[in-house]
Image (cartoon, rainbow, N blue to C red):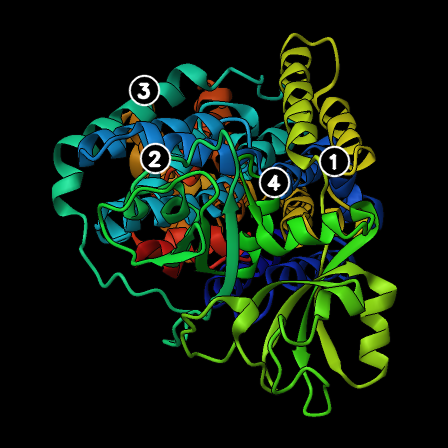
Amino acid sequence: MDAALVIGLLFVAIILFATEKISVDLVTLGLLCSLVLTGILTPAEAFEGFGQDVIVMLGSIFVIGAAFRETGVLDTVGHVLARTSGGRPRRIVAGMMSTVGGISAFMNNTTVTAMFLGPVIGLARRLGIPPSRLLMPLAFSSILGGTCTLIGTSTNLAVSGAMSKMKMEPIGMFELTPVGLVLFAAGLFYMLVLGCRLLPERDKTESDGTGTPIREYLCEVVILPGSPIIGQEVYASDFSVMEFQVVKIRRDSKDIEVGPHVRLAEGDIVLVAGKVQNLIRVKKIEGIDILEDIGLRSSGVEMKDASIVEVVLTPKSSLVGQSLRSSNFRRRSGLSVLALLRGDRTLSDHMADVPLEAGDMLLLQGPYDRIRGFEQDSEMVVITEHAIAHGARKRGIAVLIIFAVAVLLSSLGILPASIAFLLVALIAMATRCMTLDAAYENIDWRLLILIGGMTAFGTAMSKSGADQMLADLVIGGLQPFGAVAVLAGFSVLTVLLTQPMSNAAAALVVLPVALQAAETMQANPRTFAITIMLSASISLLTPLSLVASWSMGRGNIGSVIS
C-alpha cells in the first residue's frame, strides 16, 4: 500500500510539474505534507533534505553570480569577446561558446546565460546578423559547459546531495571534467560544422515579450581621454556591444551626422538611446561617462551619497514646458538628469534642449532627500530606485579572485565546498558588491525547496519499496539485453522527463529507481547516478526542456530561442 501510494504521488507530481499550473515549490511542499500525513515519512525525515550542505552551496552560487553581474565583471568579458572575435560567423560562435562554456563550468548556467544575453545581442546588432544566429549557441554552450564541474549546474549539485543522503560518496569538484569536456567538444564541433547551417534567421526587432518594442532612454555620453572606444567606427563600436543606438554626435560644438564610416574621437558627446540598466552600467566602464554625471561631480555634490531613481513628471511640475538648460535644473536642484524617455517617440535633439512634458520619464541622480522633496511637492513621482556601486568593477574582480581560490581549496579538500562558497558570498556582500536585499532576491528559493523536498521524496521511495517496484519493471524489460541497455533506458527516461519538468526534478525522480536497479544487477551505482545526472543536465531535445530549466531561473527562454 505504501509503495503504491508513493508511486501515485510521484505521477501526480510529474503531471503538476509538467503543467506548471501550480508553482514547483508549492507542489513539493504539498508532497512532503502528504507523505507525513500518511505516515510514510516522519517530520524529521521530510525536512531533512533542507539541511544538506548542497542547499547552502547552491544558494551561495546564486549570490556570487549576482555579484559578478552587479559589478559588471561579466560585462567586461562580453566586451572583450566582441572586440576580439572579428567578423567571421564561425569564429564568433567558437569564441563565444568557448568563453561562455568555460564560465558556466564554475557558475550556474542560467545566470551565465542571462548575463551574456545583452552583450551577445549587441554583438549580433554590431555585425548586422539576426540574434537567433548567436543566442541558440549561447544557450547550448552554457548548458554543456555546466557539465564540466560539480558547481556548473544546479542539477549536478542536486544529484550529488542526493547521493550523500543515500550514503554514497558525493561527486568531486572535477570528477565530471573528463566527460564534460568530451560533451562540450562534441557540441562545439557539431555547432561549427552543421549547427551553424541550421540556425534560424528571425526578425531582429526586439520587444518586451508582448510584441511591444522596448522603450529606450535618451542619454549623452562623453568619450574621455585614453578611452578604448576612440577611433572605433560608430556602427562597429562598443556602444553597439552595450546595446546602445547612436543617435547623434556633437564634436567641437558641431553636430555630426551618424554614418557607417564615422569614427569616434576623444571629447565627443554621443547621444545614445538605451535601456536604463545599460545606462547605469556606463558608470562602471572606463573611458566613457555620462555628461550630466560629470556636471554633477563638478558642482560639488558628494557622489557616494547619491542615488539613481526613475521619476515621472506630473502635470503640476514646474519643469513642464521648460528645457533642462533654460530651467537651470541642475544648479537649483543639485540633481542631475542622466537620461530622458518620452513614451515611444524617438528624440533626436540634445537632452538639455528638449522641452519637457508631463509624463516624461527622467533618470535622476543626486541626494535622495532632494529627490524626495520634489516628490512631496508633487513635481514628480519616483517609480524605481537603482543602487550605485562605486568602484564596483575592482571589487568584483577581487571577489572573482577569491572565488577562484575557493574553488581550488574545495577541490583539494582543504575546505568544504559549502563553507568555501558561503565565505565568498559573505565577502561579496561585505565589500558592497551587492546589497543584502539583492542577495535574497537573486537566490532561487523555489529551486532550493525543490531539491530539499525531492531528496526527501527519494527517502520515501526507498522506505516504501516503491523504488524496487519501478526498478523491477525497468529491469524486467531490458535486463535480457544487459546492464548497458538498462542504463540506456534510464538515460532515455530522464531525457524524456526533462521536457516537461525541470532538470533537477527529473534527475531526483529517476535517481532512486536507477540506483536500486544498479544494486539489483550488482552494477556500479555511481555509473548510474552520473549517467542520470548528465542525461538531465544536457537535455537539448526540444525547447521545452530549456523552458523548464529556464523557468527555475525566473527568465524567459523565448528570448533565447527567438
Along the viewing direction, whichever of 388 and 495 lies nearer the viewer: 388
Q: 287 above or below 300? A: above
Residue under the image location 44 percent in, 17 percent down: 177
Q: 495 above or below 227? A: below
Nearer the N terminus, badge 4 or badge 2? 2
- The three-letter code of the residue at mark 4 reads Lys
x, y percentage for residue 432?
78, 38
Along the viewing direction, whichever of 343 and 480 lies nearer the viewer: 343
Q: Measure how far apart labels 3 and 2 are at the Cα level.
A: 41 Å
x, y percentage for residue 13?
55, 60
Mark 3 highlights which residue?
A: 182
Mark 2 highlights which residue?
A: 231
Dot 3 falls on a residue whose secondary structure is helix
Circle 1 Cα neighbour tier, 10 Å, few/some/many (<14 / 14–19 / ≥20): some
Residue 33 visible within the image = yes
The reply, left or right, for residue 404 in relation to residue 379 is left
Residue 444 visible within the image = no
Along the viewing direction, whichever of 68 and 188 lies nearer the viewer: 68
Dot 2 falls on a residue whose secondary structure is loop
- The three-letter code of the residue at mark 1 reads Val
x, y percentage for residue 24?
60, 60
Q: 83 above or below 555? A: above
Nearer the N terminus, badge 3 or badge 2? 3
- The three-letter code of the residue at mark 2 reads Gly
x, y percentage for residue 72?
58, 39
Mark 1 highlights which residue?
A: 56
Nearer the N terminus, badge 1 or badge 2? 1
The reply, left or right, for residue 153 in relation to residue 245 is right
Mark 4 highlights which residue?
A: 284
Residue 429 is drawn in which quadrant? Answer: top right
Nearer the N terminus, badge 4 or badge 1? 1
Q: Measure how far apart labels 4 and 3 are at the Cα level.
A: 37 Å
